[in-house]
Structure formats: C-alpha cells, structure tokens
Amino acid sequence: MPIYEYECTSCGHCFERIMKAGDPAPACPACGRGETKKRVAAFRTNAWSTFLDGMEKRVSPQKFK
C-alpha cells in the first residue's frame, strides 16, 4: 500500500497515511476535520538507472572493465 501525504485545508497540518488507492481522504489528526487534500510527494528511486546500467553491461561489457 502506498504512503499518501495530506494537508488539512482548515488548520494547515501536514500528515502521512498508508492507504489503499481509492480510499476516501482521512480526517485531520490535529483538528479532526475532514477537509484534507492530497499533497504532491517527492519520489526518488535508482531502480531505472540500475536497470539501464545492467542492460549496458550486457550490450557493451568492454565499457565496464
């Protein structure tokens, strides 16, 4: 299950929740109101570059000696 970041539109409190995709937005844990919006979260991974390096090693192994 992914981690979602939310921000309360009433009090401005930011929090994270582990939720299923499609679940309704949770209430704010600080003020208890249900007026929250999903924030854009930064996501970084090196999986793609690792994959490309592995493919390059197979195609051109002389570059990695």
Image (cartoon, rainbow, N blue to C red):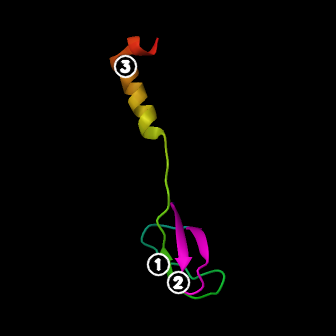
Crowding around mark 2 (Cα neighbors within 10 Å: few <14, some 14 to 19, many 20+) is some
Q: Look at mark 1 in the image and give the residue it sits on.
A: 24
Determine which quarter of the picture holds residue 31. bottom right
Tell me the number on the disc at residue 58: 3
Residue at horizontal 53%, vertical 73%? 6
**CA separation in Å, label 1 and label 2:** 16 Å
Q: Are marks 1 and 2 in contact (CB under 8 Å)?
A: no
Q: Nearer the viewer, mark 3 or mark 2?
A: 2
Q: Position of residue 60 (x, y in %)?
A: 35, 16
Majority SS type along the magenta span: strand
Q: Position of residue 51 (x, y in %)?
A: 41, 33
Q: Nearer the viewer, mark 1 or mark 3?
A: 3
Question: Along the polypeptide, which appears first: circle 3 or circle 2?
Answer: 2
Tell me the number on the disc at residue 9: 2
Question: Along the polypeptide, which appears first: circle 1 or circle 3?
Answer: 1
Determine which quarter of the picture holds residue 16. bottom right
Crowding around mark 1 (Cα neighbors within 10 Å: few <14, some 14 to 19, many 20+) is few
Q: Looking at the image, which residue sits at the far left?
A: 59
Q: Looking at the image, which residue sits at the far right?
A: 30
- Going by the numbered disc 1, the residue's amino acid type is Pro
Residue at horizontal 61%, vertical 78%? 13
With respect to residue 52, does 3 lie above or below? below
Please provide the residue range marked out in magenta: 2-17
**CA separation in Å, label 1 and label 3:** 46 Å
Q: Nearer the viewer, mark 1 or mark 2?
A: 2
Q: Secondary structure at mark 1?
A: loop
- Going by the numbered disc 3, the residue's amino acid type is Arg
Q: Position of residue 4 (x, y in %)?
A: 52, 66
